[in-house]
Image (cartoon, grey):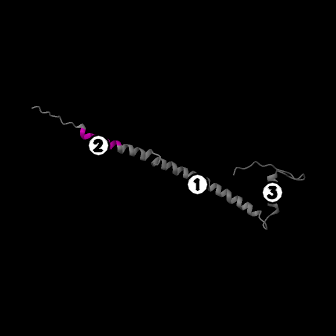
Amino acid sequence: MWTRQHKQRNTGRLIIPALCAVFVSYFGYHAYHGEFGITSRYRLQAETADLQAQLDAVKARRMELERRVRLMHDGTIEKDMLDEQARGALNLSRTDEITIMLPETAN
């Protein structure tokens, strides 16, 4: 009768821990670098801060425009304000006036 004897191999004991290490590495990498990972969170927070600054600037500009429009409503219209706005929009002046051209400021 023949008997087979197998030598004990250590590689069989390393298969499951190696697969677990691969899965943990894969999910760890994507938790840090993935679309919804840690680095994306910081990038989105920076973009949110930039957009909030733009929103604040637009709100300030809107408040200024609303204030100027309020000056031209019925009952509170000022002739000076109306005259200034009309001349600026139409780029006109009278013949007896001196016009001083100023550089346009960036708002």
**Which kind of residue does numbered mark 3 sit on?**
Glu
4 shown above or below 57: above
Magenta part of the chain: 12-22
x and y percent of residue 92 in the render? Answer: 84, 51
Magenta segment, principal secondary structure? helix
Q: Is residue 56 left or right of residue 3?
A: right
Of tags 3 and 1, the one toward the viewer is 1
- Inspect the magenta stretch and tell me whether residue 16 lies in it: yes
Which residue occupies 66% across, 57% down?
60
Q: Secondary structure at mark 1?
A: helix
Q: In which quarter of the view is residue 21 placed?
A: top left
Q: Nearer the viewer, residue 106 or 24?
A: 24
Q: Is residue 20 above or below residue 63?
A: above
* Among the two numbered marks 2 and 3 on one chain, the one whose residue lies closer to the N terminus: 2
Of badges 2 and 3, nearer the viewer stands: 2
Q: Judge from the rendering whether residue 51 lies leftward or rightward of residue 18; answer left or right.
A: right
Q: How many marks?
A: 3
Instruction: Provide the residue designation for mark 2.
Output: 17
Q: Residue at x 82, y 54 (%)?
A: 87
20 or 6: nearer the eye? 6
Q: Residue furthest bottom?
A: 75
Provide the residue designation for mark 3: 84
Name which of mark 3 and mark 1 comes first in the sequence: 1
Residue at which label 1 appears: 52
